Image (spheres, helix red, strand yellow):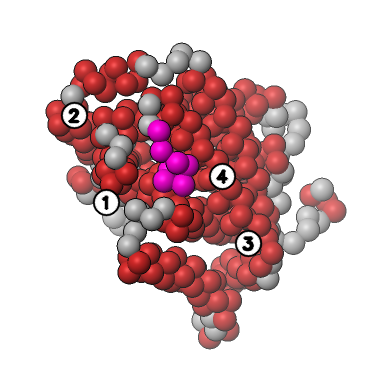
Amino acid sequence: MTRPPKKAKWWKHPAIRIVGSGVMLALLFTILPFGDMRRAIAAMPWYVWPAALATYMCLHLIGVAKWRLMTNVAGAGLSFGAAARAYYWGLFGNTFLPSIVGGDAVRMATAMRHVRSGHGLVLGSLVDRFLDIIGLVLVAGVGAWLSPLALGPESRTIFLVAIGVLTAAGLGGLAVLWFFPVRRLPFKVRRKLVPLRRAVRATAGNPWSLGAALGLGALLQSLLVVLNWGLGIAIGIDIPLYVWLFVWPLAKISGLLPVTQGGIGVREAAQAALFAPFGVSAVKAVATGLVFEVVIISGGLLGGALAWLSGARHSPATGAPISPVTHAGPLPPHAA
């Protein structure tokens, strides 16, 4: 007798997040003078938007390299072309699916038929996302260290300790998976866990690759901060870059809360609150955030178009995808 499918919780429905974004934006437009915000956005030269979009798309090539590095360390065997197509499909998915998790699922589903280890792909993607969050916190920590108004001495110490705890938690998770006594489990369970454990060992056994991926993630986030700094200058925010290094990553982290669609509304509100001690008007802070939201959405749509066009040229009929298998080692001769 088949069980009836479980009904999704009403509060998990995507429509709830869309409504949440609408409510947040309505509150911002109600509290802040809409005319001032419109004038702030209109003051931005017309060429800034296409330049920002092109920069945004190019910067994500760093993300492609980082994600591919982590998945391949875990044994996925993903080519750069396949990784780029899957990655930009993920950007497209972020535009419509709730939170970055939806985009990550699209990315992995697209890449799955091009890898030799599905377990390596999933594990590498999880590690890649975790390193992204650490990279954001590290960039914010640099901004807090450079900016005397960002945090007081005690708060700064707490902030740095939180970075250490977060890093230790990630390394501890890998250590638990490494030393977990798999032999004590039933054979059927062990057989299913072998590919995952092999992927974990391959990942934990490459600390230099983990460090390189963390560096690439921090570089990507830092360059996105520079991009937003440039948008802020175009709108009229005249503050040092190190303030942006503190504010923007924390605003982005706040947008990860699953209460709005893609963090729209929450990021802008957090950005306005974090900029307040530095004398930046809420109108300009929110206006800059909204301009970057347009860049993100446009980038997702453009990423989907580029991935679709690229995929049409590399369809299975012409050539190239690798059939997924469960091992993480080299392909056997008959599969090459």
Q: Residue furthest left?
A: 30
Residue drawn 75% across the image and 28% down it? 318
Residue 308 appears in the rendering: no
Which amino acid lies under the numbered mark 3 shown in the image of this protein?
Leu
- In three-dimensional space, the C-alpha distance between marks 2 and 3, rounded to whole angstroms, equals 44 Å
Residue 130 appears left or right of 208 = left
Quadrant of the image for the N terminus? bottom left
Label number found at residue 34? none
Which residue is labeled 4 in the image?
Answer: 220
Mark 1 or mark 2, which is nearer to you?
A: 2
- In three-dimensional space, the C-alpha distance between marks 1 and 4, rounded to whole angstroms, equals 39 Å
- The kind of secondary structure element at disc 2 is loop
Residue drawn 45% across the image and 15% down it? 45
Mark 4 or mark 2, which is nearer to you?
A: 2
Which residue is labeled 3 in the image?
Answer: 210
* Front residue of 234 and 78: 234
Which amino acid lies under the numbered mark 1 shown in the image of this protein?
Lys
Residue drawn 35% across the image and 39% down it? 262
Question: Which comes sooner in the sequence, label 3 or label 4?
Answer: 3
Measuring from the top left, give residue 149's x and y in whole percent. Answer: 34, 53
Q: Residues within 10 Å of mark 1 (few under 14, many from 20)?
A: few
Q: Residues within 10 Å of mark 4 (few under 14, many from 20)?
A: many
From this view, report whether residue 154 is shown above or below residue 151: below
Which amino acid lies under the numbered mark 4 shown in the image of this protein?
Leu
Residue 107 appears left or right of 250 = right
Which residue is labeled 2 in the image?
Answer: 32
Q: Residues within 10 Å of mark 3 (few under 14, many from 20)?
A: many
Question: Which comes sooner in the sequence, label 4 or label 2?
Answer: 2
